[in-house]
């Protein structure tokens, strides 16, 4: 197993549960992949994924491994899903309860928009229910297979979810208030895409979030730690600070790996929890490069510029998850995907990690993580300090305009750019979600668990069913399912 990200750990847990000898090789000093913590003066700040949804995916994984998720970590449901503010005025909380959200929308935009919101929620649920079984949890189905699995009624449902329409266009028909159109369009960025080009089916993400957002006690890294512990308890082995140099092939079949140290580790199969762009570029060996199709550079998903901060705040009362919108939201995606440059006036996500129900407002410095979308050009653009500084000025000016003052010292901040993400995930340009979900075929074009090289299987956010913590876990389970089927074993799924 190459990589102890969430997908790799999920695959390893399932395979260990089948009685197979599983060894995970991870180049980093700890598990998690894109999950990471930045330490600033002893304060650990979640600086990767911060939103935990679909906990039942992990409850199923732990149960199949003979354990309970709740025995390994504590996750509490959030009352407020996210707090939103706009440069041109208005604030809105979305709640775990649809009716509370509808009432808040009525206060912001009127009764007709509240009705449209309820209709939107029903449509988002329909999209999720249409795609969950026959697509999300299936081994990379094509359009024909999806229609066949859905039957005649399913074909009608597929037509109703508007797969050929862009999310931006569909939302323009769902809402009259441009602020709400932009708010729900933002869900396309959860899979690294522009809402102007992503299919309307991505409104299913709104339903997933409406089903609940949980806060993990101690931060998201605890989830990766829990998965690693579960694997080890079930007989798996993890080697950290161990970098794979190449995948070994024997007669065209993956038969193990060779480490950068020169050591060789034999195996009957190899599961690569790595971005397919790096595999295709030969970063795991030239012979393994043919395992996947070459992703076109213009298909890369979003990267990001992030700020991990210890700071004092004043004014705007933050929730745990917060989004601040500029006055021209679509311009951000024209800057990134059209002009391939940092956005001049981006939306800003702020995760206030010391804000939790019942804890009150923190006194003194608090842990903040800020994200701004960026183009995936970290392999050819270093981003001069003045350019990042200009973006930072725009970010904090937007926050200030919306009422949030942030006082941070230089020694209390860590900035990460697409070039830094490229260094962590070579071959990606800093793209954090594999390929962008642009156009109705994009989801079908992602590689599945079985690669073109026999014995080499794939997991992670760049393969089916796509990015996001629960989806990546599903990709790992699909990889384990494929391995089990090819070895003639009975999978638990």
Image (cartoon, rainbow, N blue to C red):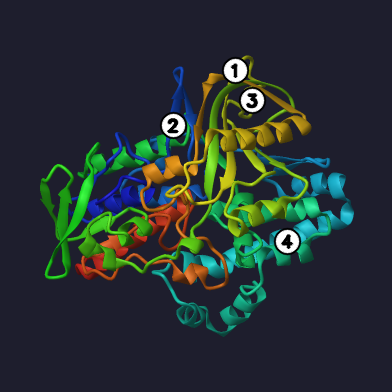
Q: Which element is circle 4 on?
A: helix
- Please tell me which residue is depicted at 12% across the width and 50% down the height of the picture: 265
For disc 4, the marked residue is 120
Would you say 102 lies left or right of 37 here?
right
107 displayed left or right of 38: right
The earlier-in-sequence mark between 4 and 1 is 4
Q: Give the alpha-carbon distance from disc 2 to disc 1, as whole Å.
A: 17 Å
The residue labelled by disc 3 is 358
Residue beneath disc 2:
37
Foreground mark, 3 or 4, reads 4
Instruction: Work out whether mark 4 precedes mark 2 in sequence or the reverse, and give the earlier one.
Output: 2
Residue beneath disc 1? 365
Query: How far separated are the C-alphas under marks 3 and 2?
Result: 24 Å
Given residues 375 and 407, the one toward you in this image is: 375
Q: Position of residue 419 (x, y in %)?
A: 45, 43
Q: Mark 2 and mark 1 in contact? Answer it, CB < 8 Å.
A: no
Separation of marks 4 and 1 at Cα, in angstroms:
39 Å
At label 3, counting other C-alpha atoms closer than 10 Å, the crowd grade (few under 14, some 14-19, many 20 or more) is few
Q: Nearer the viewer, mark 3 or mark 1?
A: 1
Dot 4 crowding, Cα within 10 Å, few <14, some 14–19, many 20+: some
Q: Is residue 49 above or below residue 448?
A: above
């Amino acid at each position: 197993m190459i990589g102890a990200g969430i997908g790799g750990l999920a695959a390893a847990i399932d395979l260990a549960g089948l009685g197979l000898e599983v060894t995970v090789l991870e180049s980093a000093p700890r598990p998690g992949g894109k999950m990471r913590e930045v330490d600033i003066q002893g304060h650990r700040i979640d600086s990767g994924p911060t939103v935990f949804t679909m906990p039942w995916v992990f409850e199923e994984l732990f149960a199949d491994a003979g354990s309970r998720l709740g025995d390994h970590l504590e996750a509490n449901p959030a009352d407020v899903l996210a707090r939103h503010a706009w440069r041109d005025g208005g604030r809105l909380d979305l709640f775990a309860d649809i009716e509370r959200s509808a009432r808040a929308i009525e206060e912001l935009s009127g009764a007709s928009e509240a009705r449209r919101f309820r209709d939107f929620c029903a449509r988002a649920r329909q999209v999720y229910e249409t795609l969950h079984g026959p697509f999300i949890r299936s081994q990379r189905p094509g359009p024909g297979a999806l229609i066949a699995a859905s039957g005649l009624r399913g074909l009608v449902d597929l037509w109703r979810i508007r797969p050929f329409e862009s999310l931006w266009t569909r939302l323009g028909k769902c809402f009259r208030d441009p602020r709400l159109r932009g708010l729900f369009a933002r869900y396309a960025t959860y899979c690294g895409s522009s809402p102007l080009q992503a299919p309307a089916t991505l409104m299913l993400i709104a339903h997933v979030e409406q089903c609940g957002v949980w806060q993990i006690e101690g931060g998201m890294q605890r989830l990766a730690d829990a998965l690693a512990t579960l694997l080890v308890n079930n007989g798996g082995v993890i080697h950290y600070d161990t970098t794979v140099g190449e995948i070994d092939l024997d007669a065209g079949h993956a038969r193990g790996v060779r480490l950068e140290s020169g050591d060789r580790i034999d195996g009957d199969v190899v599961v690569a929890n790595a971005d397919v762009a790096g595999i295709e570029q030969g970063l795991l060996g030239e012979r393994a490069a043919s395992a996947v199709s070459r992703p076109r550079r213009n298909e890369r998903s979003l990267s990001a510029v992030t700020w991990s901060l210890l700071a004092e705040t004043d004014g705007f009362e933050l929730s745990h998850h917060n989004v601040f919108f500029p006055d021209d939201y679509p311009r951000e995606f024209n800057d990134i995907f059209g002009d391939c440059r940092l956005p001049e006036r981006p939306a800003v996500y702020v995760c206030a990690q010391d804000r939790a129900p019942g804890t009150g407002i923190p006194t003194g410095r608090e842990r903040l993580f800020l994200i701004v979308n960026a183009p995936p050009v970290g392999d050819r653009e270093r981003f001069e300090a003045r350019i990042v500084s200009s973006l930072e000025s725009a970010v904090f000016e937007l926050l200030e305009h919306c009422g949030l003052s942030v006082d941070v010292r230089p020694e209390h901040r860590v900035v990460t750019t697409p070039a830094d993400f490229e260094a962590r995930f070579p071959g990606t340009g800093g793209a954090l979600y594999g390929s962008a979900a642009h156009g109705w075929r994009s989801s079908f074009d992602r590689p599945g668990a079985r690669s073109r090289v026999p014995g080499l299987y794939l997991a992670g956010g760049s393969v089916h069913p796509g990015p996001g913590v629960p989806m990546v876990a599903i990709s790992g389970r699909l990889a384990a399912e494929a391995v089990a089927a090819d070895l003639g074993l009975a999978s638990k799924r």
